[in-house]
Amino acid sequence: MADVELKPQVYMDPRPKEYFDRYHRRARTREPSPMYEVVRIVTMLHGLITFRARGLGAENIPIGPVILAPNHASFMDHFFIGAFIRRRVRFMAKSQLFRPPLGQIVFGLGGAFPVRRGHHDEEAFITSFEIIRRGGAIVMYCEGSRSRTGRLADTAKPGIGRLALETGVPVLPVAILGSYQIRNWKRLRFPKVTVQYGKPFKFELVEHPTREQQQEVADFIFDKIRELHDELARVGHRAALRNARRQRRTERAAADGVPAL
């Protein structure tokens, strides 16, 4: 049976820059409201029960400013990424999501901020830099838009390379497996979803990186995401969970100075 078809993507948001200023102003000056935790709890329960979602390696996320770089295949990816993380993360989300009333409540109050599609949106980067300066965690998708097949894009967008170089903060790759099939819930088909958080790495700070430098770093980050995703797909959801549990036992045993079982 074929997957449920998605609506055509809209790559241009005609609304003026000024429409989104309020979201950027809030994201730059305030932390997410309690709405963040409300949405997180609801979507986490939904993910755990409906899609048997599991998060692996969340302990890899460092304290302090960090850029989380996941692949992107579903509108639910935002929520899957945040579900297994104790700290609040801030999403750079496509501007079409910021529509009243749901967009204002869930995304605006929840600490997300828009990137205006179809335009060179410097405001999104200014907001990102400010959140990172304040020690926050930014989620930015390398591919720019979501995959419709679950297959990762061939190349990354340079924006994440710019953010990594101009801030010099750790980048943590994230692989999400299975989320592209979530749209099949309409046919009562509920896929398993696994989120794998990788190991952080960082780049030397470059104040004014060239376009080529931005692209080179973006490609490096995307290669790390691809490695995580390919390994998840190779071993499968269940084996990945078993391996993660075995790894945690080994690490705890090593820390305690006793042999692992």
Image: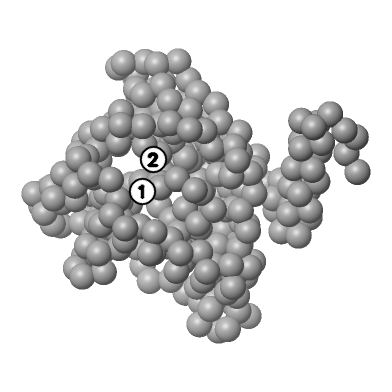
Which disc is residue 120 wearing? none
Q: Nearer the viewer, residue 257 or 100?
A: 257
Residue 176, percent from left and from top = 57, 53
- Helix, strand or loop under label 1: strand
Residue that mark 2 sits on: 138
Residue that mark 1 sits on: 91
Q: Nearer the viewer, residue 260 or 138?
A: 260
* Colour mapping used in the image: one colour
Residue 94, visible in the rendered structure: no
Residue 122, visible in the rendered structure: yes
Residue 221 appears left or right of 36:
right
The structure residue drawn at horizontal position 55% and vertical position 49%, both measured from the top left corner, is: 152
Q: Quadrant of the N terminus?
A: bottom right
Q: Nearer the viewer, residue 238 or 48?
A: 48
Quadrant housing residue 255: top right
Residue 184 appears left or right of 92:
right
- Helix, strand or loop under label 2: strand
Which kind of residue does numbered mark 1 sit on? Phe
Which kind of residue does numbered mark 2 sit on? Ile
Residue 177, percent from left and from top = 61, 56
Do the numbered discs 2 and 1 sit on residues whose CB atoms are within 8 Å? yes
Neighbour tally class for label 1: few under 14, some 14-19, many 20 plus, Cα within 10 Å: many
Residue 8 appears left or right of 103:
right
